[in-house]
Image: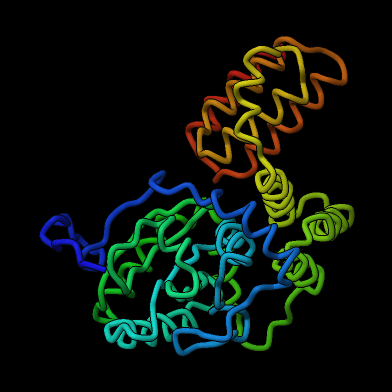
C-alpha cells in the first residue's frame, strides 16, 4: 500500500493530521448480504487476531470481520460513533497507534466504540473503504462514514479528533449522551434496571425485546422522555436495517399505496434524506383518510422524535403536517 500525499489535506483545524470528511463516500450496505451468508455458513466468523486488544468490558473494543461488520459497526453506529481501526500485524505504525486508540476507547465510557479490523484477514472491508495505506482510522456514525485519518498520530490530537466527532453527533446519536450522563452520575447511584435490560437487548440486536422493554417503561411512566426517545430510535433502527432503497422508485408509481410510501420514507431517512422523508409522509397524509392517515401521521411523529428539540427541519415539517391535517 502507498501512502497518499498528506499535503492534500490542508484543512487540519482540530482534526488529526490527514483527517478528511467522508459523509456519503462509502456504501456500507455492500457487506450486509455477504455477512449474512457467512454468518449462516461459518458461525460467528470471528477472528482470533487483533490489534493488541480483545473484547473489552462494556464492549468498548471489538474485533470485527466481514461476518459481524453489520452488527458491530453499522448497527452499533446508530447509537454511538464506531471508530474503525484498519491495521495489520506487519505494520509498525499500527503498533504505535492501536494502543492509543484502545486507551481512549476505555476512557470513553461507552460514548464511542473502537472496532479493530485486520486488513489481511478482511481484504474486502479494506477495499470497501478504498484503503491505500495503514493504519487508517474511520469514524462511522448513523451507519455512514463521517471522518477519517491515516498514520499514527499523537494521543492528544486523536483525543481532539474523537471529541469533535462526539460533539457533532451528540444530538443525532442517543447513546453518546446516555453514556456521558451515566459516567457523570454520582458514585453509587443505582442504574434503572428497566433501562439496563432494554439497552442490553439493543446491544444484542434484539430490537423487538428492546422495544417491549421501553414500552413497558412508558406504560408505567407515560411522560418518561428518555424512554420515548429510545423507543423511537429502536423502532427506526429495526426498520432501517432492512430498508429497501428500491422502495423509493416504486413509491413514485404507487402514490396511494401506504405501505410503499412508508417503506420509501424509511429508505430516505436511512440515506439521511430527512426532508424528502418528511415531505413524502406529509403528502401521504394529504391523500389519505381514516386509519391510513392516522398510521402515517403516527409514524411521522415518531420520526420527529429521532431529532433533537429545535431542529428546524422538524419544526418546518410540523407546520406542514398541521396544514395537511386541518
Residue nearest the observer in this picture, 292 or 9: 9
Q: Residue at x 58, y 86 (%)?
A: 48
Q: Residue furthest front?
A: 41
Residue 93 in picture, x, y percent from top left: 27, 83
**On screen, 71 above or below 285?**
below
Q: State whether residue 177 appears in this view.
A: no
Q: Is residue 117 left or right of residue 47?
A: left
What colour scheme has been applied to the protein in the rendered image? rainbow
Figure quadrant of the N terminus: bottom left
Q: Could you tell me which quadrant the C terminus lies in? A: top right
- Given residues 139 and 195, the one toward you in this image is 139
- Please report the residue visible at 53 percent of the width from the left and 79 percent of the height from the top: 61
**Side (left or right) of 174 relative to 325:** left
183 and 24: which is toward the camera: 24
Q: Residue at x 75, y 12 (%)?
A: 256
User: In the picture provided, is 206 more to the left or to the right than 133?
Assistant: right
Instruction: State left or right for residue 8 relative to residue 239.
Output: left
Query: Quarter-wise, where is residue 75 in the image?
Result: bottom right
The spot of residue 300 in percent (x, y) is: 68, 31
Q: Position of residue 92 (x, y in %)?
A: 28, 86
Q: Position of residue 82 (x, y in %)?
A: 50, 65
Residue 125 shows up from this direction: yes
Comparing 13 with 153, the one in front is 153
Residue 202: quarter of image: bottom right
Does residue 261 sit above or below 167 in this rendering? Answer: above
* Callout count: 0
Amino acid at each position: 500500500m502507498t501512502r497518499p500525499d498528506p499535503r492534500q489535506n490542508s484543512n487540519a483545524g482540530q482534526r488529526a493530521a490527514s483527517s478528511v470528511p467522508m459523509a456519503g463516500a462509502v456504501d456500507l450496505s455492500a457487506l450486509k448480504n455477504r455477512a449474512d451468508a457467512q454468518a449462516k455458513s461459518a458461525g460467528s466468523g470471528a477472528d482470533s487476531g487483533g490489534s493488541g486488544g480483545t473484547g473489552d468490558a462494556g464492549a468498548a473494543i471489538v474485533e470485527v470481520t466481514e461476518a459481524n461488520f453489520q452488527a458491530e459497526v453499522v448497527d452499533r453506529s446508530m447509537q454511538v460513533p464506531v471508530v474503525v481501526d484498519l491495521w495489520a500485524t506487519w505494520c509498525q505504525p499500527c503498533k504505535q497507534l492501536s494502543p492509543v486508540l484502545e486507551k481512549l476507547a476505555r476512557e470513553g465510557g461507552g460514548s464511542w466504540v473502537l472496532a479493530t479490523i485486520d486488513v489481511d484477514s478482511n481484504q474486502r472491508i479494506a477495499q470497501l473503504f478504498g484503503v491505500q495505506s495503514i493504519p487508517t482510522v474511520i469514524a462511522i456514525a448513523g451507519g455512514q462514514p463521517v471522518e477519517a485519518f491515516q498514520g499514527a498520530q499523537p494521543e492528544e490530537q486523536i483525543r481532539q479528533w474523537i471529541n469533535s466527532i462526539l460533539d457533532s453527533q451528540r444530538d443525532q446519536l442517543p447513546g453518546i449522551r446516555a453514556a456521558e450522563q451515566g459516567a457523570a452520575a454520582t458514585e453509587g447511584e443505582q442504574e434503572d434496571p428497566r433501562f439496563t435490560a432494554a439497552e442490553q437487548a439493543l446491544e444484542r440486536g434484539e430490537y423487538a425485546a428492546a422495544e417491549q422493554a421501553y414500552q413497558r417503561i412508558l406504560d408505567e411512566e407515560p411522560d418518561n422522555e428518555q424512554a420515548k426517545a429510545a423507543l423511537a430510535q429502536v423502532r427506526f433502527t429495526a426498520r432501517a436495517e432492512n430498508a429497501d432503497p428500491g422502495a423509493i422508485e416504486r413509491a413514485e408509481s404507487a402514490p396511494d399505496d401506504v405501505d410503499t410510501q412508508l417503506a420509501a420514507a424509511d429508505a430516505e431517512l436511512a440515506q439521511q434524506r430527512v426532508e424528502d422523508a418528511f415531505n413524502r409522509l406529509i403528502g401521504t397524509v394529504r391523500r389519505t383518510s381514516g386509519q391510513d392517515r392516522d398510521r402515517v401521521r403516527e409514524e411521522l411523529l415518531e420520526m420527529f422524535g429521532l431529532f433533537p428539540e429545535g431542529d428546524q427541519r422538524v419544526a418546518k415539517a410540523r407546520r406542514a403536517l398541521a396544514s395537511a391535517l386541518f
